[in-house]
Image (cartoon, grey):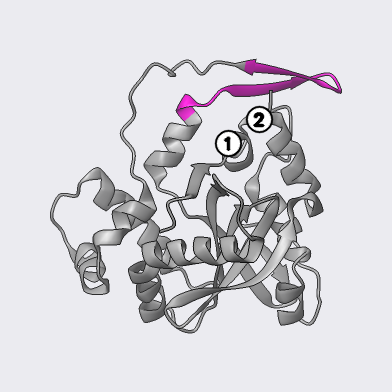
Amino acid sequence: MDKRLHYRLLPSQVLIKGSVKGDSECNYELYMVEFVNSSMFLRERVGFKPFVRPGSEAHGECDCYAGDYGLDFKLTASQTRLRALSLLSDQTELFGKQGKFIMTPPKSDQNVVCTVLHIALLKYSLAELNMLMNSNAPLTIAETDIKIFLQKLEFKKNLLLYYPHEFYFKYPIDFNTAVQEIARHINLSFKSAMQYRRFHRPEYETYMGFMYSDFFVIMELVGDEFRVVDYVNVEKSKIYTRLYNYSLY
């Protein structure tokens, strides 16, 4: 990996549902629909029909549909890391039309053990992932997080995996070069997991999106690798922009 490449987990305001008290649209699934509707690549795949939310998800419906084509969103981060983000992040509460409170979380002084999913997956081959899923032995925290993620990959749905990090480089770099380096990093980390997905659900499509330089970058899984297929400016989503701004002081 290019040593200039760095990443940070996105703030809780854009990832944790309901983390902004007073904003009924604090739900990443809502702004993901705005992103996919702004992607010419995905819109072309469905004959330029608009993606819309289902009336209900009580029976396992996808997060959005364009005609009969369903697409489901999944956060590509461990359960423990998302829980830590929720517990240890400053809390946002809105009041009036312009005001907001920022409150220190009550558990900010606690140490929380969590799994960094893309690092934990690096040591696994496809065969080892299959063994983990079939094992009845007691699991470590990391193994439990990986198993939960693999269960998501078994869903009989087209998936858009949301890699909830924003990337940055410490030195100037060409945009396309940067995006390709990030894609290389993601492919290295998730190669075995995506082999698992293709082995178990080859009939369904798989995409992954990440944030870089004010763009939501969309990749498609082709064979064993993700390939960059589209870019959407984050300003195309009013919900994302608003939620992200809540995290700024």
On screen, residue 43 versus residue 9, left or right, reads right
Residue sitting farthest toward the front: 172
Image point 39% across, 57% down: which residue?
Answer: 149
Going from N to C along the chain, the mark reached first, 2 or 1, is 1
CB-based contact (under 8 Å), mark 2 and mark 1 = yes
* Residue 180, above or below 245: below
Q: Which residue is mark 1?
A: 11
Tell me residue 166's x, y (percent). Answer: 57, 47
Is there any visible trace of residue 26 in the rendered image?
yes
Image point 38% across, 55% down: which residue?
Answer: 118
Magenta segment: does it hold 93?
yes
Q: SS class of the residue under badge 2?
A: loop
* Residue 185, above or below 226: above
Residue 247 numbered tag? 2
On screen, residue 93 versus residue 2, left or right, reads right
On screen, residue 149 versus residue 182, left or right, reads left
In terms of depth relative to the viewer, which is nearer, 114 or 16? 114
Residue 130 numbered tag? none
Magenta segment: does it hold 59?
no
Give the extent of the magenta segment: 87-102
Separation of residues labelled 2 and 1 (CA atoms): 7 Å
Residue sitting farthest toward the left: 137
Q: Can you tell which quarter of the image residue 20 is in?
A: top right
Label 2 crowd (10 A; few <14 / some 14-19 / many >=20) = some
Q: SS class of the residue under badge 1?
A: loop
Q: Amino acid at mark 2?
A: Ser
Tell me residue 60's x, y (percent). Answer: 55, 62
Label 1 crowd (10 A; few <14 / some 14-19 / many >=20) = many
Tell me residue 229's x, y (percent). Answer: 64, 74
Q: Amino acid at mark 1?
A: Pro
